[in-house]
Image (tube, rainbow, N blue to C red):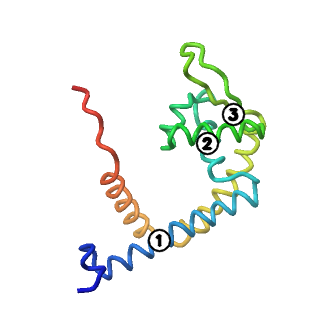
Amino acid sequence: MDGMSEVSEVSAEQWRVWRSFYAMRRQLDRALENQLQTDSAISSADYEILLAIFESTEKRLRSRDLAERIGWEKSRISHQVSRMTARGLLNRTECEDDLRGTWVEITAEGRRATLGAMRGHTRAIREFFFDVLDERELAALLSVSDKVLAAVAPAPCDPA
């Protein structure tokens, strides 16, 4: 028995699928990151935060809500927001109703950066992703994505 089969119940074909998927995901992330850096001089982390706040009703989110919305740890949010605040993309203000809470607000410069990034980012997503898949493949990918997300998503809290 080879070492790989002793470690897992994953077939050689399944490993091939996994490695291909993993490489595709990493290369797509890298291509989209490069596009944002080249076209807009912002990182994908910047864009993710800017877009979440830009799409919010009040153009601001509490730090904890921002962390929950994009699935980051609070400490990562804090560090990234600090860097973006120093660059003039965001402002932090204290919550009036909760002295422990902080609002993260998008600035005029942050709005310009977001709007500037959106067109190129959308074009890159279309070029690298949607244009290379047909409708059947997209439907299959949606189904696969939903199944994997359901398998890895934390169980909802029991309110009882």
149 horizontally vs 81: left or right: left
Amino acid at circle 3? Ile
Q: Residue 112: where, in percent of width, then height?
A: 76, 42
Which amino acid, by three-letter code, is at mark 2? Ile
Q: In this view, does 7 lie to the left or right of 88?
A: left
What is the C-alpha distance between the residues marked 3 and 1?
A: 37 Å
* Up/down of 112 relative to 100, above or below: below
Residue 20 location in percent, x, y?
Answer: 45, 76
Looking at the rendered image, the quarter that the C terminus falls into is: top left
Instruction: State which quarter of the image contains the N terminus.
Output: bottom left
Of marks 2 and 3, which one's residue comes earlier in the chain? 2
Q: Give the quarter of the image for residue 115.
A: top right
Question: Depth check: 139 or 147 in front?
Answer: 147
Q: Which amino acid does label 1 sit on?
A: Asp
Q: Where is residue 29 in the image (x, y as percent from the top left)?
A: 57, 63
Between marks 2 and 1 in the image, the one whose residue lies nearer the viewer: 2
- Of the image marks 2 and 1, the number of the one nearer the N terminus: 2
Which numbered disc flags the more N-terminal residue, 3 or 1?
3
> Which residue is at a point 59% across and 61% down the rendered structure image?
125
Q: Could you say which disc has been placed on residue 49 in the image?
A: 2
The residue labelled by disc 1 is: 134
Q: Which residue lies furthest to the bottom in this view?
A: 1
Residue 112 vertical position relative to residue 120 in the rendered view, above or below: above
Can you give x and y, in whole percent of width and height, for residue 5 in the image? 26, 79
Whole-angstrom CA distance, mark 2 to mark 1, is: 31 Å
Q: Which residue is denoted by mark 3 in the rendering?
A: 106
